[in-house]
Image (cartoon, rainbow, N blue to C red):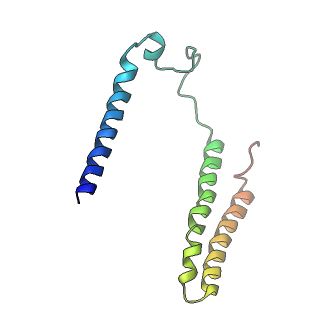
Amino acid sequence: MNLIISSVVITALISLTLAFIAFWLPSLNPDNEKLSPFECGFDPLGNSRLPFSLRFFLVAILFLLFDLEIALLLPLPWSNQLDTPLMTLFWTFIILILLTLGLIYEWIQGGLEWAE
């Protein structure tokens, strides 16, 4: 029990020390560049409220959607504990078929086209 308490205290002290240093260190020498809202090195030339590309947003969402297959397929080695190996294979194929159908649908709808 003593080991657990000392581990928690040491972890909390290290975390608080690092957080204090992270907030204290940048404010030592603030200059004009650090205080400016733009960190790219030049002044803004145009309006920052330009319309966002819906095509880029759609492709990003599709990437996230199809990237979830990894998260869905990760528990498969542990699913060997099911009654039969055929059940594991069945659920794997169900996930892959759903993802493939979604990809085909997006392809037909033209959601994967960069240029019109």
Q: How many marks?
A: 0
Most foreground residue, 95 or 116: 95
Residue 83 point in image, percent of width and height = 55, 89
Residue 22 point in image, percent of width and height = 38, 29
Q: Among all residues in the image, which is located at the extreme right? A: 116
The residue at 63%/38% (across/down) is 53
Q: Is residue 105 above or below residue 82?
A: above
Most foreground residue, 34 or 66: 34
Q: Is residue 63 above or below residue 71?
A: above
12 with respect to 109 (left or right):
left
The residue at 59%/74% (across/down) is 77
**Quadrant including the N terminus:** bottom left
Residue 99 point in image, percent of width and height = 65, 66
61 with respect to 10 (left or right):
right
The residue at 35%/28% (across/down) is 21
Q: Among all residues in the image, which is located at the extreme bottom? A: 83
Quarter of the image for residue 72 reads bottom right
Q: Among all residues in the image, which is located at the extreme front? A: 2
**Quadrant including the C terminus:** top right
Most foreground residue, 14 or 53: 14
The residue at 63%/59% (across/down) is 66
Q: Is residue 11 above or below residue 3?
A: above
Most foreground residue, 92 or 55: 92
